[in-house]
Image (spheres, helix red, strand yellow):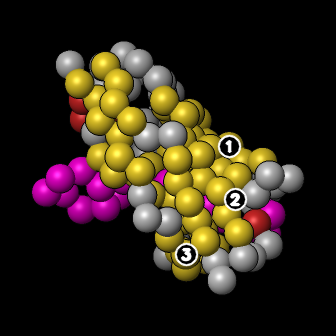
Amino acid sequence: QVQLVESGGGSVQAGGSLKLSCTASGYIFSTCVMAWYRQAPGKERGLVSRISSVGTTGYADSVKGRFTVSRDNAKNTLYLQMNSLQTEDTAVYYCAACGNYYGPYTYWGQGTQVTVSS
C-alpha cells in the first residue's frame, strides 16, 4: 500500500522560510518522479515543482529562485525548501509520486497547510 505523508507546514510571516517533507512508503521511491503541488482557496491545484528519479528539477515560474526541491532516496523522503515566502504562497501543499515526468502522477498525499501572513 502506497503512502505519502507530508509534514512541515505551518504559519509564517512574509519573508520567512519553511521546509516541507514528504515521506513515502509502499513502492520503490528511488525509481519514481516526485512532485509538489499546491491549492489555494478558490483556485485549482497547480504544480509547484518536480524532481525526476535522477534529480532533474522543474519549477513553476512563481517560485523559481525561492523554492528548492530535493530528495533523499535513502530516507524515501522528498523535500521542498521554501524561502522568501509571500502571502500568495498560502495554500495546501501536496506531494505526488510516480508517472510521467510531466504528469499525470499516480499517488498523492493528503496535504499540509502553509499559511503566510503579512
Using the numbered discs, state the Cα–Cα distance from disc 3 to disc 2 in whole angstroms: 15 Å
Label 2 residue SS: loop
The relative height of residue 39 versus residue 85 in the rendered view (above or below) is: below
* Residue sticking out furthest to the left: 42
User: Label 1 is placed on what type of residue?
Assistant: Ser
Seen in the image, is 48 located left or right of residue 58? left
Q: Residue at x 29, y 55 (%)?
A: 39
Q: Residue at x 43, y 64 (%)?
A: 110
- Magenta residues, start to end: 30-46
User: Label 3 is placed on what type of residue?
Assistant: Tyr
In the image, residue 10 lies in the stretch drawn in magenta: no
* Residue sticking out furthest to the bottom: 1
- Percent across and percent down for residue 60 are 43, 46
Disc sitting over residue 107 in the figure: 3
User: Label 2 is placed on what type of residue?
Assistant: Ser
Q: Earlier in the sequence, mark 3 or mark 2?
A: 2
